[in-house]
Amino acid sequence: MRETVRFLLGDELVEIASCDPTRTVLDWLRLDRRRTGSKEGCAEGDCGACTVVIGRLDGGELRYEAINACIRFLPTLDGCQLLTVEHLKGADGALHPVQQAMVDCHGSQCGFCTPGIVMSLFALWLNEAAPSIARIEDALAGNLCRCTGYEPIIAAGLRAAAADRAQDRFAQAQGEIASRLAELRDMQTVAIGDGERRHFSPATTEALAELIASHPQATLVAGATDVGLWVTKGMRRLDPVIHLGRIEELRAIADEGDELRFGAMANHVAVRRALATISPQLDEMMRRFGGEQVRNAGTIGGNIANGSPIGDLPPALIALGATLVLRKGSAHRELPLEAFFLDYRKQDRREGEFVEAVLVPKLPADALFHVSKISKRFDEDISALCGAFFLRRDPDNRIVEARLAFGGMAGIPKRAKAAEAALLGRYWNEATVAAAIAALAGDFTPLTDMRASAAYRLKVAGNLLRRFLLETTVPEAATRVAGLLAEAAHG
């Protein structure tokens, strides 16, 4: 085992032999390194004031990602490069093109959230040469500025995109940084800390299986987009922590003919690209997974293993008929994803098991598919409910197969079996949908909470079935907010 965490802070090599396993990157930057440009606003990954940029090797290529420093644990930076707003200003005092564009376009007022906005635009600038307005808006969805409009900030993003990259020091240094990160890579398990306050970071699934067997009480951490809040909001002690982020094989996504195989650590950005090949509606849903910072860090395995009843991926994957691959030691077990969820925050995951992969079938040519997320705002919001539907019909238009899955309607993501039964053998029309809607009351007794009332949830769940009917029988009907927003942007 290696007993230090190693990463680059800019171009400086940092080695840490001991720290709290749940010390956040933001606290370390502000308190230990006095880099106070990164701010703490919400401490839960919503506002983006703490945004920093992480450089990591992805398939041998250097990729930069904006992430929330307030919920990212410091030891998880092993093998990465960390860039903060302080790195952007040149040695001669010159502003980076992204910073200069913000000045020129008057993109800042109070300035508290400006460093995070700059870092989100900087990550976009590093990765994409000519982003559209829609893409800039998407990259900024995780940065909530309260004192000015976004138009000047979007204008700054467009102006920065036009800047010459050839002379930019970050662009010029990418080859060297990639080589240095490659040198930091090894197949050793990182283990730092004392007693129970330990952080482990294995590099292989075999090492992960051994660690879980040795430390069955450990908290497994993927992207920490939810676990981070257990610490910053719940003040929980996690003893010890096992981080899965260094296991490259768990990031792999493979096309296996009739299905896609997702390693549990595939992040939401990569998962979105792959699922979009199955249905554009999956692309739209995943574009609304938190902000870009959350999508860069969050993973498909974490979203499932977390067991949240309002997680957006499980209903969609259940409707598609996905299978979960669990591993304990060298033994594997597969089960339908819908069978994994037993009760609120309780899953069919035995002691010593971890989620290794998710198998997602592609849609048959004759299938109808739909997914809708309902939330109080379009961007970066938690669902009130999510509905995903799969239908197949015979040549006479009678329904022969139906899977209707909902999140937010029960303590777990769950199929609507009574509504499915009301559909089978009937024609796909308004009368059939009305019968299925009536049956929903037998499938669910939803809760009332701060996001929605029980009556609202039940009503909207039925309306989503009507929306599904409209989209599949009246294709010219405008039923998508995303489509309406796009029309407004270009109109």
Image (cartoon, rainbow, N blue to C red):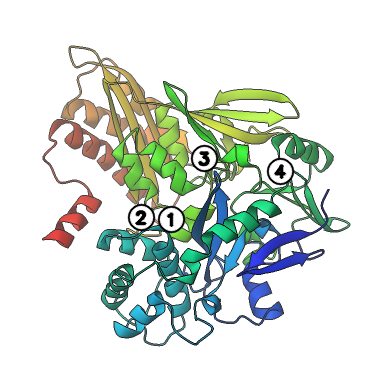
Mark sitting on residue 203: 4
The answer to whether mark 2 and mark 1 are in CB contact below 8 A is yes
The residue that disc 2 covers is 375
Q: Nearer the viewer, residue 27 or 157?
A: 157
The C terminus lies in quadrant = bottom left
User: Is residue 433 shown left or right of residue 36?
Assistant: left
The residue that disc 1 covers is 382
Q: Residues within 10 Å of mark 2 (few under 14, many from 20)?
A: some
The residue that disc 3 covers is 412
| Label whose residue precedes the other's in the sequence (1 or 3) | 1
| Label whose residue precedes the other's in the sequence (2 or 1) | 2
Tag 1: amino acid? Ile
Dot 4 falls on a residue whose secondary structure is: loop
The answer to whether mark 2 and mark 4 are in CB contact below 8 A is no
How far apart are the two marked residues, 2 and 1, measured between alpha carbons? 6 Å
How far apart are the two marked residues, 1 and 4, measured between alpha carbons? 32 Å
Q: Position of residue 474 (x, y in %)?
A: 12, 35
| Label whose residue precedes the other's in the sequence (1 or 4) | 4
Q: Position of residue 72 (x, y in %)?
A: 61, 62
Q: Residue furthest right?
A: 195
Dot 1 falls on a residue whose secondary structure is: loop
| Label whose residue precedes the other's in the sequence (2 or 4) | 4
User: Is residue 280 shown left or right of residue 86?
Assistant: left
Q: Nearer the viewer, residue 349 or 211?
A: 211
